[in-house]
Amino acid sequence: MGAIGGVRVTGKKRHMMRAMSLPAFCVWFTTFGLALLAGCSPALDWRELTVEGSGASALFPCRPENRVRRVNLAGTAVQMHLASCSAGGSNFALSHLDAGDVVKAGQVLQQLQSLTAANLGGTPIVIGPCNVPGMTPSPLARRLAVKGKRDDGATLEAEAIYFSRGSVVYQATLVGGHLDRDAADTFFASIKTE
């Protein structure tokens, strides 16, 4: 004699109950476990991060990696800092560089916008002005969309915002096969400079 789940069971019934309850438990456990995983693992897990050395913060849907590389912009070699990560089939990136002065910052804003379109092999479409809290007002601060192709011919979409604060120039970009407009709006609207 023994007790299973607070019910006293004897003989054959005890073995049948164990045999029947184990598969039922496994089905319940698997279903419940999958439901928990689905509920706790969204494709986009937004978190606010301050990008090291940038004076800017943003909501990222993933933990970005930081990289630095030298680039030539507006006739000057500068270090471009990039924080980027991938989630939901898209790459989210926030880059910044110090152009050295405000005049060059305007030139760099224009050049970055042209380079984005050229890198994707598409034509930029101005979605509208960009207004990031703390930025330096500029007619070159804007949000662009570009449609292009990957090397394999697949469609590639990008949206980006370009702005500056003094001599520091920022570019926030979302690139993927098909962009989630809500994710783009959330990412871009969250950016602020300090």
Image (cartoon, rainbow, N blue to C red):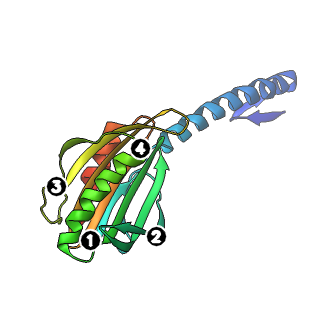
**Is the Cβ of the residue at disc 2 closer than 8 Å to that at disc 4?**
no
The quarter of the rendered structure image containing the C terminus is bottom left
Q: Nearer the viewer, residue 70 or 67?
A: 70
Label 1 to label 2, Cα distance in Å? 15 Å
Q: Position of residue 189 (x, y in %)?
A: 24, 51
Q: Earlier in the sequence, mark 2 or mark 4?
A: 2
Quarter of the figure with residue 180: top left
From the image, tell me which residue sits under label 4.
120
Label 4 to label 3, Cα distance in Å? 25 Å
Q: Earlier in the sequence, mark 1 or mark 2?
A: 2
Q: Nearer the viewer, residue 96 or 122?
A: 122
From the image, tell me which residue sits under label 3.
131
From the image, tell me which residue sits under label 2.
68
Does residue 72 appear to the left or right of 10 in the view shown? left
Q: Mark 3 or 2, which is nearer the eye?
A: 2
Q: Position of residue 183 (x, y in %)?
A: 35, 43
Q: Amino acid at mark 1?
A: Val
Label 3 to label 2, Cα distance in Å? 26 Å
Q: Number of labelled discs? A: 4
Label 1 to label 3, Cα distance in Å? 15 Å
Which label sits on residue 16? none
Q: Secondary structure at mark 2?
A: strand
Q: Nearer the viewer, residue 28 or 180?
A: 180
Q: Secondary structure at mark 3?
A: loop
